[in-house]
Image: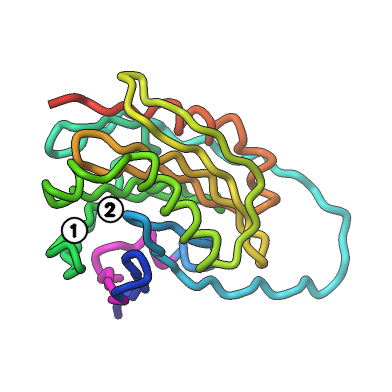
Amino acid sequence: MRLCVQLGYNTNIISVICIDKAKTMTFKRLLPLIAATFVCGSSFIVEARQPQPPAAQKPETVVQPVQPKWKLFRAPDGRFTVLMPGTPNKETQTQKTYMGEIDLEIFFAQPPKQQVAYVVVYNDFPHSYGQLTNPQTILEQAQHMVLKTTKSSLIRQRNIRSSNGHPGKEIEFINAGGKITRSRMYVAQGRLYQVMAITTKKQQKTLSKTITGYLNSFQVVLK
């Protein structure tokens, strides 16, 4: 079985990337969790089934999640580092776009017994596009497209910079099903990085500091 994800580049081209479920056991558990993510001013959407209502109303008990063992992960090409809850799964997808073929590098992890997914996605731009396009334009287009395509509501946004000065943007948004995504994206040396934590409203309350620590741990390494 395969997990297929709709991908749209600047609304001009729609294609599908598929992740082999046999290779990625965690993604099977992510289906009810992932609200949306996006690549290169585009939309990268995983449809999530709505949770079934409980059979009976019971007093809500907030259970503190069991914290996994976090460790520093370095990208295979050495161009970024980030703390991850274990070794992340990796997928590479090649997409044909109006800019030519683009490789999407996807790293994702989900700790056991937690309703959260930690995802890092990056793609390199063709040289001419990366050189001629204002990084802030890329970031603004990415934000606009993900909110529009996923019909999500923006909770907050702010402009940021990486530790070595590359422009970025942090956004937090929620979809109609209550899934919350916190995303930081950076444009650096012709590449768009997206660092995301996707979770439920309930789990977000107990994992807020952990998610912030995860986002803060991401570092662009200059080549």
Residue 113 visible here: no
Q: Nearer the viewer, residue 136 or 24?
A: 136
x, y percent for residue 49: 57, 75
Residue 150 visible here: yes
x, y percent for residue 57: 88, 66
Which callout, 2 or 1, points at the residue further toward the start of the chain?
A: 1
Q: Mark 1 and mark 2 in contact (Cβ < 8 Å)? A: yes
Residue drawn where x is 44% and y is 67% of the image:
45
- The residue wearing badge 1 is 92
Inter-mark Cα distance, 2 to 1: 6 Å
Residue drawn where x is 22% and y is 56% of the image:
104
Residue farthest along the front direction in this orientation: 132
**Label disc, if present, on residue 205 of the rendered structure:** none
- The residue wearing badge 2 is 106
Q: Where 67 sits versus 142, above or below?
A: above
Q: Quadrant of residue 206?
A: top right
Q: Characterize the local packing of mark 1: few (<14), some (14-19) or many (20 or more) Cα atoms within 10 angstroms.
A: few
x, y percent for residue 143: 48, 52
Residue drawn where x is 11% and y is 46% of the image:
127
- Say what secondary structure mark 2 lies in: strand
- Say what secondary structure mark 1 lies in: strand
Q: Nearer the viewer, residue 16 or 167?
A: 167
